[in-house]
């Protein structure tokens, strides 16, 4: 069976890179004494996968990873053992046991929700957000594995709302299309004709699709 684990990467750990996070999780899993499943070969390792890497400098409120185990176990027992081996800034929020045939979280991932706490905003920025979102096309240049490529951000934006100085973004995050929050912010403030302010961006939720609607990834 497999465990779908939801955890938080707190703001204090935001400068920890993905590889360091993976190593920290592997060490915690080994310390936990859980019946983990390992790869075959001369250098066996824990079969641990994350739904999506977090960018350096970004906290995550509800990150998702998959941990295959040997035998049967309740989610509550798994959560208790793993939590005892993790630091306070890397808490486990929930654990869901699933069958080995259950699709990997990475394969179910469609989008992600982010919140950007903006240091300052130009006057009338709420109207600017509405006008930005009303565009049929939002041309931008994004970095890909083969270099810088032009793209249209509009189909990759599922939602964009402003509440005070907090901008909530729901953006595509999958193999076929990904819109990074940094690129969205740069495009938005260029459209506004204003200098982009400093912002703390947090990934608050990973999302999949069910019956034509976006839902929390861990619910699939």
Image (spheres, rainbow, N blue to C red):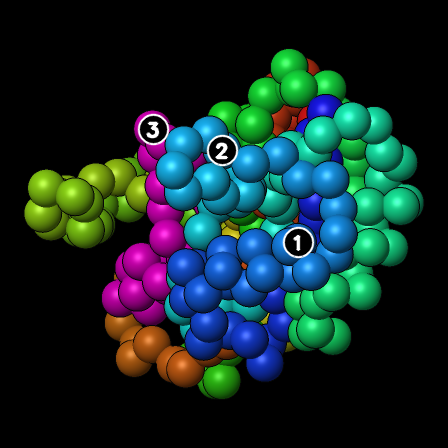
For image coordinates 78% across by 27% down, the residue present is 71
Decide whether residue 185 is among the magenta residues. Answer: yes
Q: Residues within 10 Å of mark 2 (few under 14, many from 20)?
A: few
| Tag 2 residue | 39
Nearer to me, 80 or 34: 34
**Looking at the rendering, which quadrant does residue 68 occupy?**
top right
Q: Contact (CB < 8 A) between labels 2 and 1?
A: no
User: What segment is highlighted magenta in the picture?
Assistant: 171-190
For image coordinates 61% across by 65% down, the residue present is 9
Question: Tag 2, which secondary structure?
Answer: loop
Nearer to me, 15 or 112: 15
| Tag 3 residue | 176
Q: Position of residue 63 (x, y in %)?
A: 62, 52
Does the rendering let one see residue 165?
Answer: no
| N-term mark: 2 or 3 | 2
Decide whether residue 70 is among the magenta residues. Answer: no
| Tag 1 residue | 29
């Amino acid at each position: 069976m497999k465990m779908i684990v939801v955890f938080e990467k707190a703001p204090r750990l935001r400068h920890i890179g993905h590889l360091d996070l993976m190593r920290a999780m592997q060490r915690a899993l080994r310390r936990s004494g859980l019946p983990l499943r390992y790869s075959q070969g001369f250098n066996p390792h824990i079969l641990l996968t994350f739904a999506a890497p977090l960018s350096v400098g970004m906290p995550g409120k509800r990150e998702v990873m998959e941990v295959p185990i040997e035998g049967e176990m309740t989610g509550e027992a798994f959560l208790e053992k793993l939590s005892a081996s993790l630091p306070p800034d890397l808490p486990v929020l929930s654990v869901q046991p699933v069958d080995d045939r259950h699709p990997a979280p990475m394969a179910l991932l469609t989008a992600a929700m982010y919140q950007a706490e903006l240091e300052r905003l130009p006057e009338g920025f709420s109207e600017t957000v509405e006008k930005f979102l009303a565009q049929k096309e939002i041309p931008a240049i994004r970095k890909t594995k083969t270099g810088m490529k032009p793209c249209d951000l509009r189909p990759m934006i599922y939602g964009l709302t402003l509440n005070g100085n907090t901008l909530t973004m729901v953006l595509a995050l999958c193999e076929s299309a990904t819109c990074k929050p940094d690129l969205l912010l740069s495009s938005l403030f260029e459209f506004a004709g204003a200098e982009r302010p400093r912002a703390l961006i947090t990934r608050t939720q990973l999302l999949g699709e069910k019956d034509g609607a976006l839902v929390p990834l861990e619910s699939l």
